Amino acid sequence: MITDIAYQNQGVYHGRPGVLLSSTLTSVPRPPSASANYGLPWTYTNLNYLFGLMRLERDFTPHLMGYASFGGQSGWEKGDYAQPTVTDVRTGAATYGGMYVPAVTTNESLQAGFRGKFDTGPLRHEVNLGGSSVWTNMATAYSMALTKGDTNLYGPYGNQAHLPYTFSGGNVDNPQLNNATRLWSLFFSDTVKAFHDRVALTAGFRYQNIRQISYNYGASPADRYAQGAFTPVVGLTVHPTRHTAIYFNRSEGLSPGPTAGGNVVNLGEIFPPYRTVQYEVGAKYIQRNFAASLALFQMSIPSSYVEPLGDTGRSIYTVNGMQHNRGIELNINGTIVKGLRFNGGATVLDATQVRTANGAQNGLKSLGVPGYMISGNIEYDVPKLKGLTLVARVEQTGHQWANADNTQRVPAWTRADLAARYVFLAGKKPLTLRFGVDNIANNSYWTSAYGGYLYQGLPRVYKFSFTTDL
């Protein structure tokens, strides 16, 4: 039996928020100084979570094992939020609103099943049979300003007053149930291996049932969705040699629809469940101190994002069609020469909008998804000082779009980090010291437009830590 219990508290005060862009803009403002903070001085968020997991396993015979796990989480969060909405790219002029949001969430999950192994002639079977269930409740409310204030990305930042909150939804002092999600599933799979495990075929299915209900802050249900589906999975792995593997996977899934969250006027709104089909084909090579993998994949998910609500200074969470993703991913790691190691990779993505409202954005690129991502990490063991390793990392991300109409283009960016670690014995205990500098050039850049928000990359950051075995 394994039991894990943890408590987490996190507070952020006057944090730098995501930035929204007015729908009238056709370009993206230059990022402010890397260390600038255009967040509103009265904003904050406070998060408290208590979560735990218990897992049991029992061997009934050498070929049959049963397992069960139960997990739960209780969370309380509250915050005063405001995101600037830029209205002038050249000057950085922006408006802001304000919203106070408390939320209480509870999550419980249960999974149980059996794993068995048996042979049928030359074939080896590994069978997995079981079921799972997840319950999620969210109680929330909000209070917001119906007026808007003026601010600026480039300063000054000190005079943005807290706007009067004159409109509320629910009871902010005692949040009531806003949405509930119930998921349960039954699953079965059989992995058949042959030719000394050089060929493995997996086939199975899952029956999933999803029920989502939204409530008007504890009152009668406002919207409800219920859907069930059989979702098959199949996979094939072939080892042509001891060091290589070629594989193909096809899987389907039924997932709960997105739920509007954050500083949005439709907080708590739930959207219909959706079904996805994912394909992946790839190859892996591993030999001694070298490994490489190449994969091609394809899948679709709902296209969801936050956008400004006219010129009100507020925003709304939107789901508009689907995001169709196709990509290729390459990873390489290994030893170049003794004491010098490399690991890195590259991903090329083609994320396209489909089935949008009235077909208006069909064929355009999905917002917040870069066309490519490249990263490389080199480690060097200093020969004359045993235990000292120097690390250098470079990361580059391609351009992306900040709106569904593909008129607001976020430039590509590059970041370089340096670090070192030193491992030695303190008495008879190993001690590891780590020191690093992220964004060593202190570059200023927009790191992401995911979800409709512009997020700025962190400035130069110094980090130090140590670990030891007790």
Image: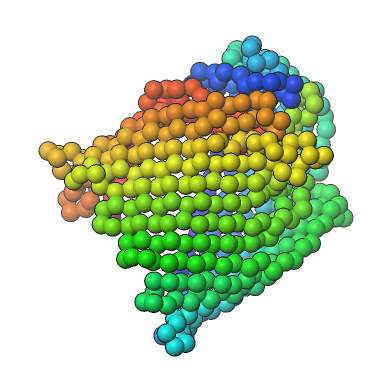
Residue 24: percent from left, percent from top:
74, 21
Residue at x 45%, y 66% (from the top left corner): 237
User: Residue 212 occupies which quadrant of the picture?
Assistant: bottom right
Residue 88: percent from left, percent from top:
68, 15
Visible residue check, residue 267: no
In this view, which residue lies farthest toward the front? Answer: 240
Viewer-proximal residue among 201 and 431: 201
Q: Is residue 35 above or below residue 110?
A: above
Residue 59: percent from left, percent from top:
45, 82
Q: Is residue 330 above or below residue 396?
A: below
User: Residue 446 occupies which quadrant of the picture?
Assistant: top right
Visible residue check, residue 442: yes
Residue at x 61%, y 41% (from the top left corner): 351
Viewer-proximal residue among 396 and 390: 396
The C terminus: image quadrant: bottom left
Residue at x 56%, y 67% (from the top left corner): 234
Residue at x 38%, y 30% (from the top left corner): 416
- Marks counted in the figure total 0
Viewer-proximal residue among 234 and 436: 234
